[in-house]
Image (cartoon, helix red, strand yellow):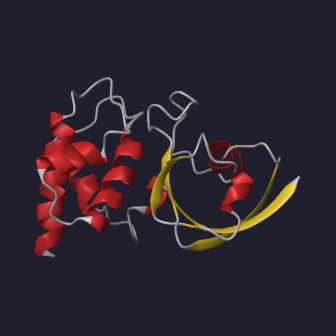
Amino acid sequence: MVRVTTRINGDEVTFVCEPDETLLDVLRDRLNLTGAKEGCGTGDCGACSVTLDGRVVCSCLVLGAEAEGRQVGTVEGIARNGKLHPLQEKFLEFAALQCGVCTPGFLVAAKALLERNPDPTEAEIRFGLAGNLCRCTGYDKIVRAVQAAAAAMRKG
């Protein structure tokens, strides 16, 4: 077993995991942060996306032990003090979700994109979200929701 101390959504967290246990399994099974979903287990779908030191990664491809001393951001950390983030509000407003399996990964990736680029073009949004697959919505509603959230965030 490996003892790991990290920051998850801004809070210091210590956990113990197997050396070969994925960050996704640690988040879901040990820390009860079930927002990230296992869609494929091979890093192809993005349903398990989290940020690791600000970079979007598939948590199914990262070992839990690799989180030692690092910053992890999950979908659970997007809302603050019971208030939805503009991305979450716009996903609801634009009906940019259906079954919900991919939604946490899209939200994490979109938030990371808007932190880097607060005024992305449609092409930049599509590129920024390209690692996330959706089998239900057809992507247009997701792109429109991210555009609207970006505009709302720029207005303050």
Residue 99 image position (x, y, % from top left): 35, 28
Q: Residue at x 18, y 43 (%)?
A: 143
* 135 or 90: nearer the viewer: 135
- Say left or right for 69 vs 18: left
Q: Residue at x 12, y 53 (%)?
A: 121
- Say left or right for 133 vs 127: right
* 139 or 42: nearer the viewer: 42
Query: What is the tally of numbered marks visible in this picture?
Result: 0
Query: In the figure, 113 relative to 135: above or below?
Result: below
* 112 or 137: nearer the viewer: 112
Quarter of the rendering occupied by the C terminus: bottom left
Q: Residue at x 47, y 31 (%)?
A: 44
Using the rendered view, name the quadrant where residue 103 is placed.
top left
Residue 139 image position (x, y, % from top left): 21, 33
**Residue 95 in view, yes or no:** no
Q: Residue at x 70, y 52 (%)?
A: 64
* 24 or 65: nearer the viewer: 65
